[in-house]
Image (spheres, rainbow, N blue to C red):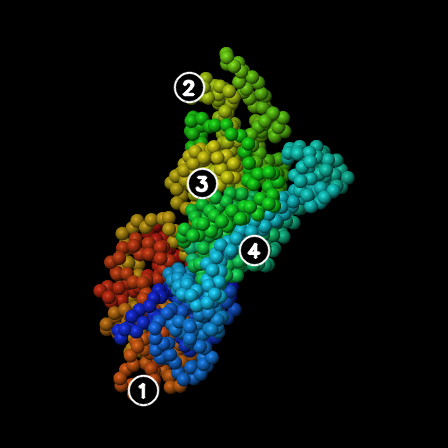
Amino acid sequence: MDKFPLKGSREAAAEGNNYITAYQTVMKKSNGHSIGAGDGDHPLAPHSKQSYTAAATTSLTANTDDEDMIDITPRSSPGDLIGSSSGYHRETVTESDTERDFAPNQRAMHHHHQHQHVPTHSAFGDPMDGALSFYGSSEVHDEIPGIGQYEDFHTIDWQRDIARDRMRHRYIVKKRQDSLWDLIKGAIDAGSGWLCVLLVGIAAGCVAGMVDIGASWMSDLKHGICPTAFWFNREQCCYPDKQSVFEEGNCSMWKTWPEIFGLNRTGTGPNIVSYILYILWALLFASLSASLVRMFAPYACGSGIPEIKTILSGFIIRGYLGKWTLLIKSVGLMLSVSAGLTLGKEGPMVHIASCIGNIFSHLFPKYGRNEAKKREILSAASAAGVSVAFGAPIGGVLFSLEEVSYYFPLKTLWRSFFCALIAAFVLRSLTPFGNEHSVLFFVEYNKPWIFFELIPFVFLGIMGGVIGTFFIKANLWWCRYRKFSKLGQYPVSEVLFVTLVTAIICYPNPFTRMNMNELIFLLVSKCSSGDSNPLCDYKRMNISTGTSFIEVTEPGPGVYRSIWLLVLTFVLKLALTIFTFGIKVPSGLFIPSLLLGAIMGRIVGIGVEQFAYSYPNIWFFTGECADSNLITPGLYAVVGAAAVLGGVTRMTVSLVVIMFELTGGVRYIVPLMAAAMASKWVGDALGRQGIYDAHIALNGYPFLDSKEEFAHTTLAADVMQPKRNETLNVITQDSMTVEDVENLLKETEHNGYPVVVSRENQYLVGFVLRRDLNLAIGNAKRLIEGINSNSIVLFTSTTPTQNLGPPPLKLKKILDMAPITVTDQTPMETVVDMFRKLGLRQTLVTHNGRLLGVITKKDVLRHVKQMDNEDPNTVLFN
């Protein structure tokens, strides 16, 4: 929770915790009439939630009985309409149930609503209750803002939202036959998903192009400026001469800061001036980035992928995908990358693209008002984020499928592919990579690899798993220390200190001083004659083999010096990445991981190359080096980069595809696969979680990983709340008074209550929400004459024959009559699968039809952690 401090008092936090899930369906009453089970909007509900906040006393970290449930009924705060899920009406053949419980004055309040052509039953109330009609039906208006909205830090009900969308779709299909306009609206609705991902792809490509261009220009600003065109970076300024990074001195167009101040380009004095200005520019960029994040968008810090993964699993984090987060994340990312911090801009691109997807989804009510459908757009947007980050559209789709998405139907796969394609095309049009290729690190070698090289490739995979696991454990230790110490109270100071240390340490070493993307490109590049790159300081000679001459290379002093500098760079970058990932600026992990692996791979590649040079007649080289030296150190850098990134993130399929799209080296898929699998096996053996899953657990998000198996033999009775010797708080269907229900609400903090036949005969009738009870009782007392504390609360359709007291309060409309239930002997393995695959919030436990208890998602998460010998209290949210 260090990234997400909860604002306001305990009561304010409790207000968002006052929700519970239930499963809506249409049930048959005993008299044969069809009713809407769990009609969620009471006809007397007010236009705000002030009447029930007094009873909301739970906390986000308080009791575990029922507090981790959310409301099925679509009513929230008046200001939260955007992103809400609209209620769509069920179709029935009778109107008898819709008006049965209306007092005469309520009918008068709603006399302006017409029922002709509008289905009379809603999943969440009657149209006359102020609920939303189907999208496209203009006869009924949304009188209560926020209908269908979920509260912050709660999980959505997948089953409810998906069923609601099916009802909406059936209604639209039925209406197509009525008129040409309805037919056109149906066609627009059918194509809205494709149009939405098209807009997301275009916007993601444009934003990524601006971020790339801005970050490149500001990164070079630390070293100098192009006086003839100050908006050019160094590569564009020197492009006519096509000079590399090590030929900077020969570029007359580019001026370093000492030259701007009238000094020479080289020498002790100019070097000191360059050093000081490098540090000052870095501090300026970092302070701007941290200050913008702190003042305007606290959610814009970090990578964003752990939170995107949690959001796609159904969790709600208000503002995390908002307009301010998009703006500050984009600007702050340019600044933090330009500051020279050991972080990348590729991971946050997923967050930026998801923000764009969330914003555009509100243009289409089909997605903006349905949280489950919105996540289809967010899955496509995350694919576009990886597509624009690496120029890897196919890898982006696979990344979304393998790593971040929780619910990924086939149509989402197609739309993700289309969105990633559009984003890559737009980005290619902007050409931010500065070359004719749309990939980030294009490799030009195409020599075949030999079978012997699988040994060093697998070795690189093993080392990648070890390095990745070490990084995860070290970074988690530091983030946990930051979270629970005073250091977390000074985020800007921490950013400035890390930036100062990074700038001071990195400037003297030419490999650490340059942009990380440029260094990776150097490491994966092939050496050719005339290269100024010190890694290519080879003595080339021809050796006779008796029948022909082959060219061999002997490393010169520049190569040996570069190896030592690379070893130093590796140690510094690893240490700096551990302390940098998690500070309060936008920061990604892909590029630092690729850099660490590329350094390791290049060093191993040089070693294998010299081994082949020293012992060319060993049997596994025989015949392989007849024409030329086939060992390419740059290929080892590519494989090593994939190995470390796989060890850190535990990706496999998407990693391999991203890497060969990243480099254009399709020929080297098998080495990449070998390294990725070795890296994952070793990483899983040393530590179960990847870096993103580890940060999800650190922040206490309610994430049930669908890739993990629950292998324990516990039963539902072992996990349910309350335990067998504790009291189960229930409401009876026809024997409790209003005062009894109000006392129950005051004495307990649960967010929902099972409704049973009677206290002696606890057969389950349904499930009712605390929030709905508060709303219904408060408004009935205020608006219905005769309702008082002695009124009987009825959850049945029948009225008692002899009722000498005040009139009863009928609340069957707010009762969910089809909650998901399991028996007490159900294996927890089955229960966990139900929560994962159905997206449940809670399930009721019964025995021979009699109610025993409730299992919530938080109970399941805590039980899983307890079985894995972890602290169950780390699950903080619902």
Q: Classify mark 1: residues with Cα within 10 Å, few (<14), some (14-19) or many (20+).
A: few
Q: Classify mark 2: residues with Cα within 10 Å, few (<14), some (14-19) or many (20+).
A: few
Residue holding disc 1: 805
Q: CA distance from mark 1 to mark 3?
A: 71 Å
Residue holding disc 2: 619
The residue at 70%/35% (across/down) is 251
Instruction: Answer left or right for 445 relative to 225.
Output: left
Q: Of the residues under marks 1 and 3, which one precedes in the sequence? A: 3
- Please name the amino acid that badge 2 sits on: Trp
Residue holding disc 3: 647
Front tag of 1 and 4? 4
Outermost residue on the right side: it is 262
Residue holding disc 4: 326
Question: Percent x, y for residue 27?
Answer: 31, 69
The residue at 52%/14% (across/down) is 548
Compare residues 581 and 437 and report the one nearer the observer. Answer: 437
The residue at 46%/63% (across/down) is 183
> Which of the 4 image quarters holds residue 877?
bottom left
